[in-house]
Image (cartoon, rainbow, N blue to C red):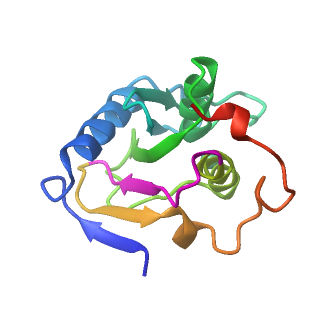
């Protein structure tokens, strides 16, 4: 429940564009240590796309592609996120299984989903965009904790 396996052709056009934008970002990933390149893109309420790629460092402190994409949207004043797509590839092998966002990123996505006030779609893809899984955030992060739980007013971040 809340997770739908599909294909690239099975995606609605805006989600195809979103995944393509994530794949473009993936090509710019800075991953000299693991060779695992990730790209992510978010679709805002206004229909704009913002993308990010993962960044690794020698100290193993890094930034996930999803976090980079969300930060890019925030920096432009977009806080209401309707969907997020993530795609990955390895320099050493094809990523055939669908890798979802890490735990920390699920929390980040939940933050902005609650600003939006929607159970948003997370589109997860392997390198070849086949298979693809479209998951509801609530399926990826059940019993979540967010601004709603602390009665934090985030309305100023809505348009
Ligand atoms: Zn992450």
Queried whether the magenta region covers residue 48, the answer comes back as: no
Residue ranking furthest to the left: 9
The residue at the point 85 percent across, 55 percent down is 151
Image quadrant assignment for residue 107: bottom right
**Horizontal placement of 82 versus 34: left or right?**
left
Image quadrant assignment for residue 49: top left
The residue at the point 60 percent across, 21 percent down is 77
Q: Can residue 105 be seen?
A: yes
In the picture shown, does residue 73 fall above or below 44? above
Count of labels in the image: 0
Magenta span: 115-127
The residue at the point 33 percent across, 31 percent down is 21
Q: Position of residue 26 (x, y in %)?
A: 40, 32
Depth check: give the residue in front, 62 or 109: 109
Query: What quarter of the picture does the N terminus occupy?
Result: bottom left
Q: Position of residue 93 (x, y in %)?
A: 35, 49
Queried whether the magenta region covers residue 120, the answer comes back as: yes
Depth check: give the residue in front, 97 or 52: 52
Depth check: give the residue in front, 51 or 117: 117
Residue ranking furthest to the bottom: 1
**Horizontal placement of 128 versus 103: left or right?**
left
Q: Position of residue 85 (x, y in %)?
A: 41, 46
Image quadrant assignment for residue 103: bottom right
Q: Position of residue 130 (x, y in %)?
A: 22, 58
């Amino acid at each position: 429940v809340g997770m739908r396996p599909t294909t690239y052709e099975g995606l609605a056009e805006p989600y195809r564009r979103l995944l393509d934008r994530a794949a473009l970002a993936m090509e710019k990933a800075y991953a000299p240590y693991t060779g695992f390149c990730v790209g992510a893109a978010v679709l805002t309420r206004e229909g704009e796309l913002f993308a990010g790629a993962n960044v690794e460092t020698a100290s193993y402190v890094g930034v996930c592609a999803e976090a980079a994409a969300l930060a890019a949207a925030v920096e432009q004043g977009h806080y209401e996120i309707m969907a997020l797509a993530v795609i990955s590839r390895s320099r050493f092998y094809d990523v055939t299984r669908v890798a979802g966002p890490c735990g920390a990123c699920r929390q980040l996505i939940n933050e902005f989903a609650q600003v939006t006030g929607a159970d948003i779609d997370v589109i997860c893809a392997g390198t070849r965009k086949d298979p693809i899984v479209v998951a509801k955030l609530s399926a990826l992060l059940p019993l979540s904790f967010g601004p709603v739980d602390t009665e934090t007013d985030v309305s100023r971040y809505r348009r």
